[in-house]
Amino acid sequence: MNVMNDSPRRKELTRQAAQLFVQEGFDRTTVRMLAQEMGIKSGSLFHHFRDKQEILAAVIEAGTQNALAIARAALESCDHTPEARLQAMARAHLETLLTDRNAHVVALYEWRRLDPEARDHLSHLRDAYEALWEAVIDEALDAGLIHGDRFLVSRFVMGALNWTVRWYDPAGSRSPDDLAHELVAMITRRPA
Amino acid sequence: MNVMNDSPRRKELTRQAAQLFVQEGFDRTTVRMLAQEMGIKSGSLFHHFRDKQEILAAVIEAGTQNALAIARAALESCDHTPEARLQAMARAHLETLLTDRNAHVVALYEWRRLDPEARDHLSHLRDAYEALWEAVIDEALDAGLIHGDRFLVSRFVMGALNWTVRWYDPAGSRSPDDLAHELVAMITRRPA
DNA sequence: GATTTACACTAGCGCTTGCTTGGTTGACCC
DNA sequence: GGGTCAACCAAGCAAGCGCTAGTGTAAATC
């Protein structure tokens, strides 16, 4: 057995699993369906993953790592004004929906299906991502760019952004940049 | 069999099912678990519901009808200013989380588990609810209370509100009225 | 050339699933 | 006091589930 390594093969299988989990939901996706999608037999699947739960954890971990990397890169390469940083974070968040949508949908919808150990491990990753957001929102509050309760504002913003996976069409006419711009304009008190 | 009636018994069973669906998720909730929670045997369940899918549809329908009724009542009893109406809608939305949280969580998380016919029927109900929101947002836009793209603003607001089921604690110190006030203040351009 | 490693296969075990069947119970009704 | 009917039950079926055991094999490593 080959558990918990980072082989390219395993990464590719994880990507394919993410798509099925989105289509069918984790519980409805059987190991036989996963295997067929991957072009192998169901028994062979357990060479790469200890059990079905581990596939879910791998999908969510990959998505969160990706989001974290994109957000960090965006913060490093943007202007250091609170408004620019706010917008960079929003755009980065929406860009992950382009590059890795399946994993993010799974992370949002199937989080509760993780067993306690995996949830514990992954919640640290997610906390790191949310900490980035809260820092940026704190700066915007301090600068007087936005007003209100720190806790509530960050929850409302995260909600608005996470909800986009329900309706955002990457093939449509609106770019992540447009959406980020509109969102920042909505919550800041200056005209867009 | 007794399908698709509105007996009080069925309503009570639906309420109990909602709780289990929230705790375990629809797919993980077995008919035996449902029956035990209801104090009957699993076979008896199919006297009240044609199949497991119909229980899910009943839960979601009850929650959406409830939300629609509360929102309509709130709009009728509030001031006719755009700001008051916006706030009344937000507060009504959050109040449904107090009175009928389980059903709403199920509607948000398990919508995709509905079969096509049920989804078609229920999406009309949901559209009616969202139409209320879009009308109120249109008024606020026309009045210059908020600015921006009509479609995007309503999606962002719905996202912020729907996301509250993830973190809002009804037993905490913040009332639905507080939250509604803060949200409206965040998106309108006047100080709170 | 022998051994190890990575990856895949076949076959199926033990269990749970949603749902059905055929029948019982007790309250109400003309 | 026979008939009706909603509500429930015991028993179980057919299908599908996650996962395991044991084996084959080609490539890499020694």
Image (cartoon, coloured by chain):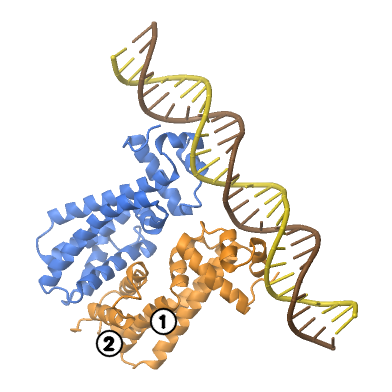
Chain colours: A blue, B orange, C brown, D yellow
Q: Quadrant of residue A131?
A: bottom left
**B93 displayed left or right of B110:** left
Quarter placement of the N terminus of chain A: top left
**How many labels were placed on the picture?**
2
Would residue B83 be seen by someone viewing this image from the given angle?
Answer: yes
Q: Is residue A183 left or right of residue A115?
A: left
Tell me if residue B125 can be seen. Answer: no
Q: Secondary structure at mark 1?
A: helix
Of residues A108 and A75, the one drawn nearer to the viewer in this rendering: A108
Q: Is residue B3 above or below residue A13?
A: below
Residue located 9% across and 61% down the image = A80
SS state under label 2: loop
Q: Chain of mark 1?
A: B
Dot placed on the residue nearer the N-terminal end, 1 or 2: 1
Q: Tell me the amino acid under the disc marked 1.
A: Leu
Identity, as a three-letter code, of the amino acid under mark 2: Ala
Q: Which residue is mark 2?
A: B143
Q: Any mark on residue B132, and which?
A: 1
Q: Position of residue A182 (x, y in %)?
A: 24, 69
The front one of B25 and A157 is B25
Image location (x, y in percent) of residue A83 = 14, 67
Residue A30 at x, y percent in the picture: 51, 46
- Counting from the top left corner in percent of width and height, residue B62 is at 52, 75
Foreground: disc 1 or disc 2: 1
Which chain does the numbered disc 2 sit on?
B
Residue A24 as seen in the image, left or right of residue A128: right
Q: How far separated are the C-alphas under marks 1 and 2? A: 17 Å
* Marks 1 & 2 on one chain: yes
Measuring 22% from the left and 55% from the top, which residue is drawn there?
A128
